[in-house]
Amino acid sequence: MHSPQKKIVRQVLFALVWILAIFYFLEKGPEFKKLVDLSLRQIILASGVMLVSYCINAQKFRTIFQAFKIHLSLFEWLGISQVMRMGNMIFFKSGTVTVAYFLKSFHQLSYSTFIVALTAEKILDLYMIVGMMLLYSLGLFFFQDLDFGFVVLSGIFFSGLNYFLFKPISWKLKWTSRPFQLIQKTLDTWKDFQKTTRAITLILFWKILHMVSVGGRLYIAFIMLNQPITFFECVVISGAIRLAGWVGIVPGNLGIREVTVGLTASFLGNNFDHGLFAATIDRILETIWTFLLGMFYYHYLSMKKYKQGTEIATD
């Protein structure tokens, strides 16, 4: 599908999500208002957990770029994750493009290396989720008679990812034209990343911690609805959200994340509507904090770029 067609499809889907959301809350709005029991203490607690999850996510990005020898200042590694999130909420991948441009301009990080860094982040995401699925399926096999085929399938998938992630690439392309040189450069960058075992371990650590923190956010959202749910179930739902993040057909995964929470909550024995309500509460708080912090850091990073340009002009 050509780029203009993709753009039209995304716009149509985005509009469709909004239409469905409006109809849904016109139907379920009274029930939502009846369930929600907000207090200032709960809002402060939810905001605190959300800010902690933002800091953990920022640490993840800091570690990823350190693996590529890019050392960001405190405000940079806190800021780029917020600017990326805010931009991606506004328009499809605009935040990612903004951060790529900033790192290229200020830290001389090539676009190909940036793409490898984000690809590595996605692969590690999948690696973590499949690893947890393997452990979860083993638990269900031993304690709830799950079909062993699911365990084998998870094991095969996990082994394949493990091989791809840690097996050094030794491919050397024979062609010397520019497109193949770029491909070879990308492969060499990936090979260098594979050697940073400590960084990979740290990234996985921050990812797991971030998934737990998002589970904490959802747990508080369910408390606001006075709906009983375990913290472990919320962490499982958080893992499902990360997996759904691969879809990426609308900005900020609007609607996709909410439905994922509802479906996963329903699968775990909870109410679909309550799961969707909890995700909506989390989305509202996230949007407020994302735009507050995103605008602050966007201004900071823009001023930093402006100062750099001024210094160059006066030299």
Image (spheres, grey):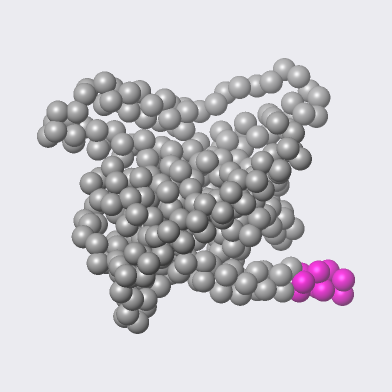
- Give residue 5's position: percent from left, percent from top: 73, 37
Above or below, 293 against 14 in this view is: below
Q: Main secondary structure of the magenta part?
A: helix
Can residue 243 be seen here? The reply is yes
Given residues 110 and 99, the one toward you in this image is 99
**Start and end of the magenta stretch?**
306-315
Tell me: 122 left or right of 210.
right
Above or below, 84 against 6 in this view is: below
| Residue 203 drawn in magenta | no
- Give residue 238's position: percent from left, percent from top: 36, 51
Tell me: 227 left or right of 183.
left
Numbered label tally: 0
Tell me: 169 left or right of 141.
right
| Residue 308 drawn in magenta | yes
- Give residue 83's position: percent from left, percent from top: 61, 63
Q: Residue at x 76, y 74 (%)?
A: 307
| Residue at the left extreme of this rendering | 143
Q: Residue at x 25, y 45 (%)?
A: 268
Q: Quadrant of residue 152?
A: top left
Image quarter in which the C terminus is found: bottom right
Q: Quadrant of residue 36?
A: bottom left
Image quarter in which the N terminus is found: top right
Q: Residue at x 65, y 34 (%)?
A: 186
